[in-house]
Image (cartoon, rainbow, N blue to C red):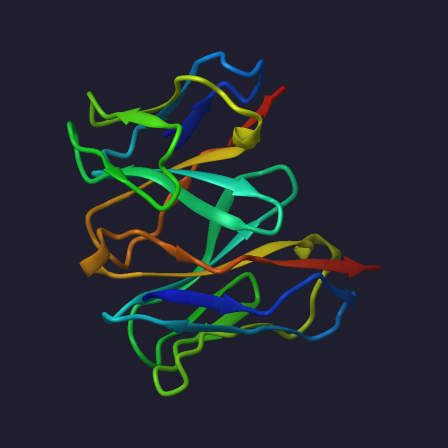
Amino acid sequence: GDSVTQMEGPVTLSEEAFLTINCTYTATGYPSLFWYVQYPGEGLQLLLKATKADDKGSNKGFEATYRKETTSFHLEKGSVQVSDSAVYFCALSYAGNNRKLIWGLGTSLAVNP
Amino acid sequence: NAGVTQTPKFRVLKTGQSMTLLCAQDMNHEYMYWYRQDPGMGLRLIHYSVGEGTTAKGEVPDGYNVSRLKKQNFLLGLESAAPSQTSVYFCASNRDMAGNEQFFGPGTRLTVL
């Protein structure tokens, strides 16, 4: 079945460090891929997305590239800030499953000053 | 636009009590979803709707009922609350295209004693 696997947290970094959060997926269709972010005490919000192979999503200094050959959508940021401390969720959806999002379990990121 | 709103924000119930969580969206979205979020388990889909008057079960529907009498509203009911239903509940909505993001409400924190 469809699934999303992301690296376990928590991830703890110092400010200005490089961030990678790995995400791999399995899907029977041709999915769109998403990264959502949840700041403490808030709901989830879309961080970036990619709808087809080789697309790169980017937002707020974060990037992720849709790699069909490795079924991956790794999240990266070159220099994290304290304000990036949050939980990050990788997810997929496609037309064949009623647009339901298939979620990873989330990766908690803490950035220390 | 208010986006997706949820009421109430917090609630404490005793075992066996009933309640209804209300989700409203003003974006004219067709698809609406109810999730629960528990530590270490990510987001799990309870029920969803693909349009006014329709509902369908997600991965953890037991103990919950839903209704979508109006396009903009999606109600989640607990007929007889149990401690296992202590969780944070999120509502989300999106348009009828797989690549579109889901918009989330701020969540309802429910405690069942």
Residue B6 vs residue A110: left or right?
Answer: left
- The residue under the point 69% across, 71% down is A79
Work out whether residue B73 can be spotted: no
Given the current orientation, which residue lies at the most extreme bottom position? Answer: A69
Relative image position of residue A90 (x, y in whole percent): 47, 62
- The residue under the point 54% across, 68% down is A6
Relative image position of residue B108 (x, y in whole percent): 52, 27
- The residue under the point 15% across, 27% down is B53
Seen from the viewer's position, the closer of residues B2 and B24 is B24
Relative image position of residue A23 (x, y in whole percent): 50, 71
Residue B80 vs residue B113: left or right?
Answer: left
Q: Quadrant of residue B20?
A: top left
Asked if B14 appears above or below B42 in the picture, the reply is: above
Asked if B32 appears above or below B19 in the picture, the reply is: below
Seen from the viewer's position, the closer of residues B34 and B30 is B34
Q: Quadrant of the N terminus of chain B?
A: top left
Q: Quadrant of residue A3?
A: bottom left
Q: Quadrant of residue B72?
A: top left
Residue A106 vs residue B32: left or right?
Answer: right
Relative image position of residue A66 (x, y in whole percent): 39, 76
- The residue under the point 30% across, 51% down is A100
Residue A108 vs residue B99: left or right?
Answer: right
